[in-house]
Amino acid sequence: MTEDTRGAARAIIDGNLYMVLATVGADGAPWASPVFYSTEDGRDLYWVSSPEVTHSRNIAHEPRIGIVLHDSRAPVGTAGPLALYLSATAEELHGEEALEGLRVIPGPAGRGGRSLAPEEVRPPAPWRVYRARVSEYSMICPRGDGRCAEHGLDYEHRAAVRF
């Protein structure tokens, strides 16, 4: 994909407040959850959750997750190129890594989140810091005239984005 695509991918990461986590439970059942996230580099995405909620329990069981970032307000039929699909490994953070996450959360001013103190994410507090480390990025290839100019395909398909 082109430099324009990398820029579009970064704009999606920077322009959204929520990501949808796709996890799987010990019983094999899929689960999707929207979570507020923060990032500096687009590679490590941080959020705060209870370790008791379904997606956190699923991550403890199976750390490989999928993530979708998209503008849910996009007009019907236009969201494809405005969505970013990520493969990542997620984990609950402890010690210095949790403090690093708290440094990044809530992100730039005006995003609506709030900063948290370390004692708010340590037992017995109900919250923990999590990180998804992204290993793969992909986007739906745009099909302006019905065909993807890069691949010549006339159906919706994803292509890797190099970050």
Image (tube, rainbow, N blue to C red):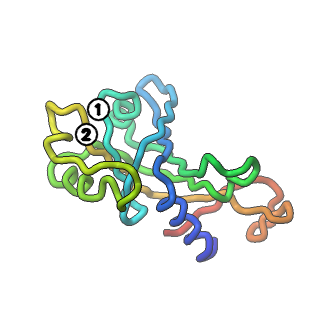
Marking on residue 51? 1
Residue furthest toward the top? 27
Residue 54 percent location from the top left of the image: 39, 28
Answer with mark 2 or mark 1, whichever residue precedes in sequence: 1
Q: Which residue is mark 2?
A: 128
Residue 145 percent location from the top left of the image: 86, 65
Residue in view at x 85 percent, y 60 percent: 146
Q: Is mark 2 in CB contact (under 8 Å) with mark 1?
A: yes
Kind of residue at disc 2: Arg
Residue in view at x 45 percent, y 43 percent: 65
What is the total number of numbered labels drawn onto the structure image?
2
In the displayed structure, would residue 101 be above or below residue 57?
Answer: below
Is disc 1 placed on a helix, strand or loop?
A: loop
Residue in view at x 16 percent, y 39 percent: 122
Image quarter of residue 119 = top left
Residue 151 percent location from the top left of the image: 75, 67
Marking on residue 25? none
Residue 48 percent location from the top left of the image: 31, 42
Kind of residue at disc 1: Pro
